[in-house]
Amino acid sequence: MPAELRSTSHGQTLVLTLSNTGLHNALDPAIYAAGTEALNGAERSTEVRSVVITGADGVFSTGGNLQRLQAHCAQGPEVQEESIDALHNWIETIRAYPKPVLAAVEGVAAGAGFALALACDLVVAARSAKFAMSYSRVGLSPDGGASWSLARTLPHALAAELLMCGDPVDAERLHALGLVNRLAEPGGALAAALALAQTLNERAPNVLASTKELLDEAAQHTLNAHLDLERQHFMRNLRHANAGEGIAAFLEKRPPRYR
């Protein structure tokens, strides 16, 4: 069967499932394009408040298809450049997406599969899951924003270890390092991610969008500049109907009804 990205709905959460039977959900341009299209469509939908990306058959993704990469070596460089651009377009779409995106990881997340998980806002992983920045083991440097994500979230020495050595790392170590948010028992990563997504679905969507933007902008700003940006978001959200609803619900000791 060809590689595909399956789309299903679980309440207000859209689940995107990587599927590439026989190739451990290896990624390819068809999946990149489908992922970008799915997020663009979900962004316009008021029915979708969060997205979970997971993998079929107990595996997240082993990253790029090495046979396809080997074939590209015999072709013009523009062929592989187009593929990388499509991956990077999907990664950028995830990072800019105003709603929470979660990764639910079982089995292995390697290479671009690991980079894809890191691009998500939150990562839920089975305790038995393994992660590997395996590029260096096959004579390649990282793509998919892997070096950017690790450089922003880990001390230099730890990021260098993951990228240069390329050895598998278990989910429990990444949880201790802060790269994995929640651990689940084997087979339970998707259910745990959906439960976490439901918690986010109950928050005000405009506030989550502001939070994502503030987090992404923080590293580029001085404190003074970022304080200005926080003020802008705070005032905009204070004037939103959801602020009135949230404050009233808190004072009345009832669940808020955000829209």
Image (cartoon, rainbow, N blue to C red):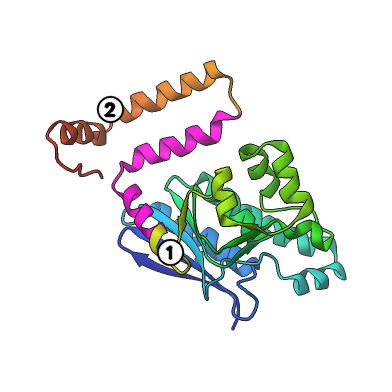
Query: Is 147 situated left or right of 34 in this image?
Result: right
Residue 239's label in the rendered image is 2
Q: How many residues crowd mark 2 within 10 Å: few (<14), some (14–19), many (20+)?
A: few
Mark 2 and mark 1 in contact? Answer it, CB < 8 Å: no
Q: Is residue 118 visible?
A: no
Q: Considering the image in quadrants, where does the C terminus appear?
A: top left
Q: Is residue 155 magenta?
A: no
Q: Amino acid at mark 1?
A: Leu
Instruction: Please tell me which residue is depicted at 39% across the width and 63% down the height of the picture.
Output: 191
Which residues, given as a range, are shown in magenta?
193-219
Q: In this rendered view, identify the residue nearer to me: 27 or 57.
A: 57
Three-letter amino acid code of the residue under disc 2:
Arg
- The first of marks 2 and 1 along the sequence is 1
Outermost residue, left side: 252
Quarter of the picture containing the N terminus is bottom right
Q: Quadrant of residue 250?
A: top left
